[in-house]
Image: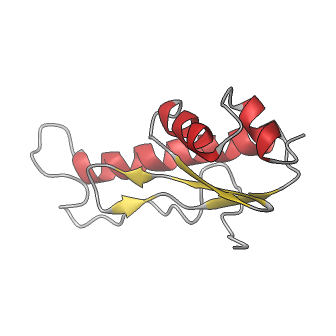
């Protein structure tokens, strides 16, 4: 059970300080996710490089489980990948991207893991 910053740091193999936790979250996610530490929990999300979109933001209040944390990171990774592909890829053999063709961006408010991105902060 993750009940505070020290527990979170241990789970992430980080030093029990904000800078080390932020570095490990960024470094050990494919999308370079960010974390914001709050007194009573955390917020997670990602800026998607190469497009003007962000993933949904997920909040977890202490206490939460490692499974809760990993589920949100997995959703963020999937959302970031979908947004990047929408902005940078398109039909095979075409110079156009799905975005330039006018297709709507993936709906990151309804994530791929059926988690609530509702933000209590």
Rendered location of residue 28, percent (x, y): 53, 30
Asked whether residue 12 appears in the rendered view, the answer is yes
**Residue lying furthest bottom in this view?**
121
The one nearer the camera, 80 or 26, is: 26
Q: Where on the picture, by quarter, is residue 104? A: bottom left
In the displayed structure image, the side of residue 39 where residue 102 appears, left or right: left
**Residue lying furthest top in this view?**
13
Which residue sits at x=66%, y=30%? 14
Is residue 91 placed above or below 42 in the rendered structure? above
Which residue sits at x=69%, y=70%? 118
Which residue sits at x=66%, y=47%? 72
In the displayed structure image, the side of residue 10 where residue 82 appears, left or right: left
The one nearer the camera, 117 or 25, is: 25
Q: How is the image coloured?
A: secondary structure
Asked whether residue 90 appears in the rendered view, the answer is no
Rendered location of residue 23, percent (x, y): 52, 37
Rendered location of residue 53, percent (x, y): 37, 61
């Amino acid at each position: 059970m993750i009940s505070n910053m020290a527990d979170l740091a241990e789970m992430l193999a980080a030093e029990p300080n904000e800078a080390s936790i932020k570095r490990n979250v960024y470094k050990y996610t494919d999308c370079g996710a960010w974390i914001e530490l709050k007194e009573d929990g955390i917020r997670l999300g990602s800026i998607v490089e190469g497009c003007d979109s962000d993933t949904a933001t997920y909040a977890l209040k202490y206490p939460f489980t490692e499974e809760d944390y990993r589920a949100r990171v997995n959703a963020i990774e999937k959302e970031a990948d979908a947004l990047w592909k929408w902005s940078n890829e398109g039909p095979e053999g075409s110079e156009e991207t799905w975005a330039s063709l006018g297709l709507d961006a993936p709906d990151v408010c309804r994530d791929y893991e059926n988690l609530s991105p509702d933000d209590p902060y």
